Amino acid sequence: MKKLTIAIDGFSSCGKSTLAKDLAKELNYIFVDSGAMYRGIAYFVLQNNLFTNGEPDTVSLIKRLDEITLTFEYNPEKFESDLLLNGITISNEIRKHEVAAIVSKIAVLKEVRSKLVKTQQKLGEFGGIIMDGRDIGTVVFPFADIKFFVTADPTIRAERRYKELVLKDSTITLAAIKANLEERDFIDTTREISPLKKADDAIELDNSNLSREAQLAFALKLINERTIDV
């Protein structure tokens, strides 16, 4: 039976990575978090103090892109893959608020997107892959076998993100999370290069009132139907 290429796009903190991970475990597919790759470059910016007047120094970053190698390595303890930056695991570091605060500003750069899209497309050459992000169904895998566009109410998204981050940083506030998500949504949907948008053939999945289990069941039903058709 043919292994599919599955693309999952959606807004920040809408649960698309959760869905992608659950599907990968259920189907025994490879999961690639494309957003983590952009966060990896944002983390590189932070670690190397590539800032000018408080903003990411994009000129310097572009000059140093060749210094960045991002890879995934399966972690048997977590049953998922870790992201490595130049051979060093950074999966925990990239989830911090300071990385989230700048990642959308990094992701608008065409040089960054070009570098990562090429890497992502190479990972998906043989199918059996689930990748989530913001331009997977429109740019990375426009001919994916099945595409999902995940969304949720903005307030619910902010509350979910807050519950996740407050466990790691007790100083974080819900207001700060909401403001960050609003800014990221605006940047993601209005950027000139590969903006976030629903592919014409994508299936919309609003999980505002769905449990994790219900979301997975919905997606699996559609995937199984598509697999039978293939």
Image (cartoon, grey):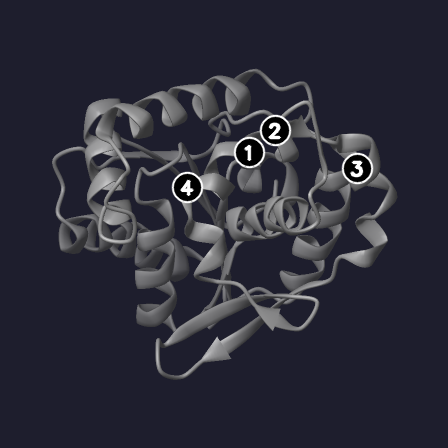
* Circles 1 and 3: CB atoms closer than 8 Å: no
Q: Earlier in the sequence, mark 1 or mark 4?
A: 4
Kind of residue at badge 1: Ile
In the depicted view, which residue is nearer to us: 6 or 133?
133
Kind of residue at badge 3: Glu
Corner quadrant of residue 42: top right
Task: Find residue 128 and report its horizontal and vertical position in percent.
Answer: 51, 67
Q: CA distance from mark 2 to mark 1?
A: 5 Å
Does residue 118 lie above or below 123 as drawn?
Answer: above
Which element carries disc 1, helix, strand or loop? helix
Task: Find residue 21 and report its horizontal and vertical position in percent.
Answer: 36, 61
Residue beneath label 4, please? 97
Residue beneath label 3, please? 111
Residue beneath label 1, please? 102
Does residue 23 lie above or below 153 as drawn?
Answer: below
Task: Find residue 230 and report its horizontal and vertical position in percent.
Answer: 46, 59
Which element carries disc 4, helix, strand or loop? helix
Asked if one can make out residue 2 in the rendered structure from this viewpoint, the answer is: no
* Circles 2 and 1: CB atoms closer than 8 Å: yes
